[in-house]
Image (cartoon, rainbow, N blue to C red):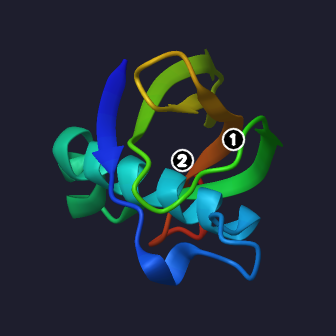
Amino acid sequence: MYSCEVEVRYADLDAYGHVNHATFLTYLETVRTKLFINEFKELLKKNIFLIIVRVECDYKHPIHLGDKVIIDIKTDEIKRTSFTLSYTIHNGNGITYAEAKTTLVSFDNRKKKSY
């Protein structure tokens, strides 16, 4: 499992004063990118990309400016050319903001096919 804290910015808020639903996916991307930079450098050097083919998010509790936001990522399922990551977005003190999943496919950009 990988875990990282994300800062809530004023620009993330919607007219209701909480983090916009689409921004939750940006938070996932931010943490996933940090993980991938550390763990998948060799794939990038080989021109292998990890492409999201599915995303789902169940919103549980609104996030407000000043809230602590931690995202935990774990691998759920690994197949031949794809894998699924699950995420828990929480504050570290019992509040879960959302639970999400992304399915990614490894793609050989030179051969233009799944890797």
The residue that disc 2 covers is 115
Q: Is residue 49 visible?
A: no
**Residue 55 placement (x, y as % from top left):** 76, 49
Q: Label 1 to label 2, Cα distance in Å?
A: 15 Å
Q: Which numbered disc covers residue 81? A: none
Q: Is residue 42 visible?
A: yes
Q: Secondary structure at mark 1?
A: strand
Residue drawn at x 69%, y 37% is 100
- Tell which tag, 1 or 2, sits nearer the viewer: 1
Tell me if 46 is positioned left or right of 91 in this view: left
- Residue 2 image-quadrant placement: top left
Residue drawn at x 65%, y 56% is 52
Q: Residues within 10 Å of mark 2 (few under 14, many from 20)?
A: some
Residue 104 position (above or below residue 88): below
Mark 1 and mark 2 lie on one chain; the one further toward the N terminus is 1
- Quarter holding the N terminus? top left
- Residue 47 image-quadrant placement: bottom left
The residue that disc 1 covers is 103
**Residue 92 placement (x, y as % from top left):** 40, 22
Q: Amino acid at mark 2?
A: Tyr
Tell me if 50 is positioned left or right of 34 in this view: right
- Residue 64 image-quadrant placement: bottom right
Closest to the observer: 15 or 32? Answer: 15
Q: Residues within 10 Å of mark 1 (few under 14, many from 20)?
A: some
Closest to the observer: 20 or 26? Answer: 20
**Residue 8 placement (x, y as % from top left):** 41, 62
Q: Amino acid at mark 1?
A: Thr
